[in-house]
Amino acid sequence: MTEQQPGMTGKASATGRRSAEPTTAMVTALVRMRGALQETRLPLELPGADEQRASRAEMVDQLEDYVIPRLMTLDAPLLAVVGGSTGAGKSTLVNSLVGTRVTTPGVLRPTTRSPVLVHHPDDAQWFGQEGLLPDLERVTRQTNDPSALQLVASPAMSPGLAILDAPDIDSVEERNRVLAAQLLAAADLWLFVTSAARYADQVPWDFLRKAAERSAAVAIVLDRTPPDAVETIQTHLARMLASRGLKDSPLFTVEEGEVSEMGLLRSSAVMEIRQWLQALANDQEARAAVVQQTLEGAVRTLARRTHQVADAAGEQADAVRRLREDANEAYDRAAVAIAESSADGTLLRGEVLARWQEFVGTGELLKSLETRVGWIRDRVVNAVKGKPQQAERVTVAVESGLETLILEHAEAAAERAEASWRSTAAGQILLRDAGEDLGRASRDFRRRAERVVRDWQSDVLEMVRTEGADKRSTARFLAFGVNGLSVALMVVVFAHTAGVTGAEAGIAGGSAVLGQKLLEAVFGDQAVRSLAERAKRLLEASVSELLDSERRRYTDLLDSLRIEPEAPERLRKAARKVDDLRFAASRGSQVAEPGSDARDAAE
């Protein structure tokens, strides 16, 4: 194969030469972008949500594991992560490159063990807990704990270069696959190992595609290749790499051969790879180019993907808004319907009307009022023969009628809200996990409705008592009593808009007129209007509060998701800041080094 230069490409080398120390502004911008990603929640099961949740987690990991630590330690050794398919011979290759056994090849598949990082003793300070991959515990002993990173100091390693042996990317154990992806995302250089039998598998190419998308530095090792098939397979693999944007990636071939008792391939089998890695280690400028190429690609890709997460967060916020609007609309309709039905005379029928007629005397009085509403007040008042117990019966009838009205509309609101939520997949899951049947009113709703109605009746009674404080000794006040006058006030409230039509119009309207005349006889016109308006507003407020408690069964579910409408713009703002700093740095480098683009083209 053609001998490769230490740098990955000429362009990368030039980029490395132009790069300056990372600014505090860029580190700060990336930290803020990480924070925005961490704070963003995508809990609703919307199309593509699973993919974006996984993407967000990967991005946060890469920022924490690689990008931010690497920006703060550009002088650290180049980290080459050796990854690949099951059985590709990664551990054997690592041992052979180092020249001694530093990592244990797996006999059984899948191999469950911790990743192993081999470095020169002088570079040990770069790989502490605060550096790359900070969530992996550092150990210097052999372990099978996947959450630990084995650090092996070997004088056989060149200073400035570290090699990390990662788990299989296609392991049957999910934890191994996740760890392998995490380690590859933290690599300055991917040393991707495949075999003659596995090089066309889909999983490795998914990883290589991601590498190409973010311009990561990648070298390919075609391992365990039969000597007579080297040329054919190498040519095919090179075409595959070129067609997938990796034509500049070095391609090495390791022929199939015997392994020593120490688990090492013969030195000549890996000589080309070892020399290439040593050349990188010895050339500070080449190392910087590789690091810069991978780092800049990672930052660019993270900023772009952040906009995709922002779009997903926007869809989540929109879905929550629609679900909230549906629930609010259902209960707002119920509140309006109750307010209208409790003021248009609807309640002045049936039991309420019968008990009211008992209180005001025979139906002759109401019948006369249909055509003679102009009766003088005194004649109306004198015709009423109601007694305290009859007023109490009206109160009970009002209580029952009003409770039934409220319950019916609360049930209807619950049904409407549930139906609207069931029309979406996200709503269905929320309903399923609610822990109660939201399509019905709460189990204790009837009891709470009864209390609301009784409290309102008590308030009306108190309003009448307070308004008549200086009239308690008058004959008219004594004749009707507080209970009788409060019943009359309820009747006036229930026909407040005089909206009943048809045969009941005269009865309901007459009932309201009669109630109003009784009240006016005691309190006067203006006071009665004020009392009726206050009682009506009080009822509406009490019912609204009661329905709000039912509405909250839906809205509390949405609030528990903690989806912030500001999250999408916060993400986009963070990504734009990172891009602005990248572009500014690029322009600054071009100004600082005139003609660099021309040199790049020549190279």
Image (cartoon, grey):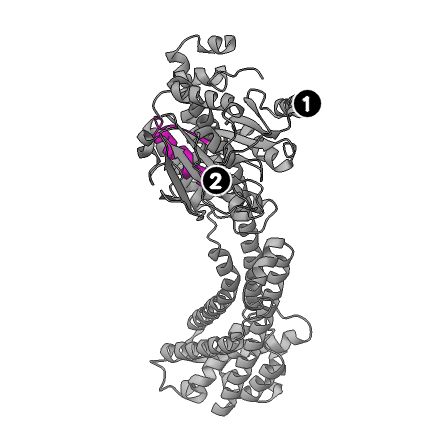
The amino acid marked with disc number 2 is: Gln
In percent of width and height, residue 534 lies at: 44, 69
Q: Looking at the image, which is closer to me, 104 or 341?
A: 104
Residue 277 seen in the figure: yes
Between the C-alphas of marks 2 and 1, the distance is 33 Å
Q: Is residue 354 left or right of residue 470?
A: right
Q: Which image quadrant for residue 118?
A: top left
Q: Position of residue 391 (x, y in %)?
A: 50, 87
Q: Magenta part of the protein: which range?
A: 59-80
The local secondary structure at tag 1 comes to helix
Amino acid residing under circle 1: Thr
Q: Which residue is mark 1?
A: 232
User: In the image shown, does 471 or 70 lie closer to the viewer?
Assistant: 70
Residue of label 2: 182
Q: Main secondary structure of the magenta part?
A: helix
Disc 2 residue crowd, few under 14, some 14–19, many 20+, Cα 10 Å: some
Magenta-drawn stretch contains 74: yes
Q: Pick whichever of labels 2 and 1 is earlier in the sequence.
A: 2
Query: Circles 2 and 1: CB distance less than 8 Å?
Result: no
Residue 448 colored in magenta in the image: no
